[in-house]
Amino acid sequence: MKYNITDYGAVPDGRICTEAIQRAIDLCGKGGTVYVPKGTFVTGALFLKSDMTLFIDEGAKLLGSKDADDFPIMSYPFEGYDQLCYASLINTDGAPYKNITIDGSGTIDGSGAALFKQEMSEKKGARGRTVCIRNTKNLTIRGVKIRQSPAWCLHLIYCKNVLLENIEVHSRFDENGRRYEGIFNGDGIDVDSCKRVVIRDSLIASQDDCIAVKSGRDVIGRRVGISSKDIVIENCRFTHGFGVAIGSEMSGGVKDVYVRGCTFENVHSIASIKATRGRGAYIKNIHYENCSLVNRSTEFTDTKYFRGAIYADAFYGYDDFDPDTPAPVDEGTPSVDGIYMKNITVDTIAGNAVYLCGLPEAPYKNIYMENVTAKGKTGMVTKNIENLQTVNVRVTGGAV
């Protein structure tokens, strides 16, 4: 059965439609569809439920209110910790859910530039997302455009059996190419302690990490202990941002990630592996295959948050570090074992072509590179790597 939001009082005239849209969601029967027709509908936080589809038709837009009061303060994970956060535009509330679909060819726009300023000023909680789906089994998001978040654009937490297909995520520019002003830490998609996730045939234009795979932070993340695993990212196009990142919040563990057949255009990195002291747990069996990067942006070169087009950095975010002096090994010492790069081409004018630096007390292990051609401002840097194998690898510096 279809529940058209206009039948419940939603109107595309700039007035807030939160109550009307939420009423349609609440009344939607099992297996039903909440339908958003053509037009721009302004709304605050909306909460989905099990066994429903939210269908946003062509020419339809759910536009986030520009008033932070329309987004209640909630407790949920962000940047590795459970903390108070502003609700997102599209949410689940944290209880177990199943069989949720978001479909169509319309747009979900978080009004992030306006909300960022308010939320940062009020400081009642961490910034909200445009879409944040938690603790859901069998989630499909297909066809829609997700835009302009106060923080990460699409955040998945504790989900299983996820398909993201033919979507667009824009956290850097609007549909007319104008940059969203003032937003930082605007990741495209964050996969946070999730299992069996497929992201395919999609476009991500990000202000920060295009896709980041995470699993909690430090002691709390290890205590929760929910890993991210069995993640496939294929046939995606990335424009702007920092490619596919693993970490830096990875204290529940990350394993079995496959990135294949993707293109990176004016993106600073294909791969970034980030596991620092204090995180503990592991990153293992990470594959990048049949991917290419061409970057002509020098917005970032070599910083504590970015080391190269292909990089694994045990000192991510450190202002000062000594890569030669080991620290004691304890439960906070992370393990990185098994990074595979095959059929990769890189051509960048920003930073190193390849940068690999593990911990002196826990070297990053078993990095395998085959058929890799990488050109950067500088070539390859390696430190504290155990068993680096290269087959038909050519890395050069001096890119102009």
Image (cartoon, helix red, strand yellow):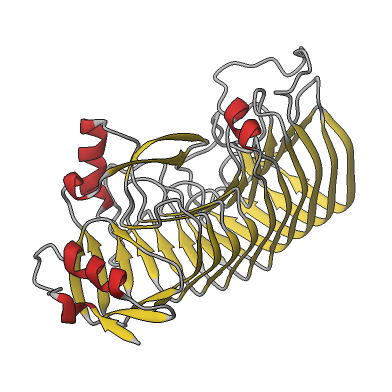
Res 23 quadrant in image = bottom left
Along the line of sight, the residue nearer the viewer: 88 or 100: 100
Q: Give the image location of residue 380, x and y in percent.
A: 74, 38
396 sits to left or right of 162: right
Residue positioned 35% across, 55% down in the render: 130
Quarter of the image that includes the N terminus: bottom left
129 sits to left or right of 277: left
Residue positioned 65% across, 32% down in the render: 222
Above or below: residue 105 compared with residue 92: below
* Residue 76 appears in the picture as rendered: yes
373 sits to left or right of 398: right
Res 146 quadrant in image = bottom left
Above or below: residue 262 compared with residue 359: below
Q: Give the image location of residue 98, x and y in percent.
A: 52, 66
Residue positioned 74% across, 45% down in the render: 396
Along the line of sight, the residue nearer the viewer: 82 or 365: 82
Q: Give the image location of residue 194, x and y in percent.
A: 61, 53
Above or below: residue 207 compared with residue 333: below
Along the line of sight, the residue nearer the viewer: 313 or 221: 221
Marks counted in the figure total 0
Along the line of sight, the residue nearer the viewer: 15 or 61: 15
Residue at the outermost bottom position: 1
* Residue 377 appears in the picture as rendered: no
Above or below: residue 376 compared with residue 42: above
Q: Give the image location of residue 195, x and y in percent.
A: 65, 57
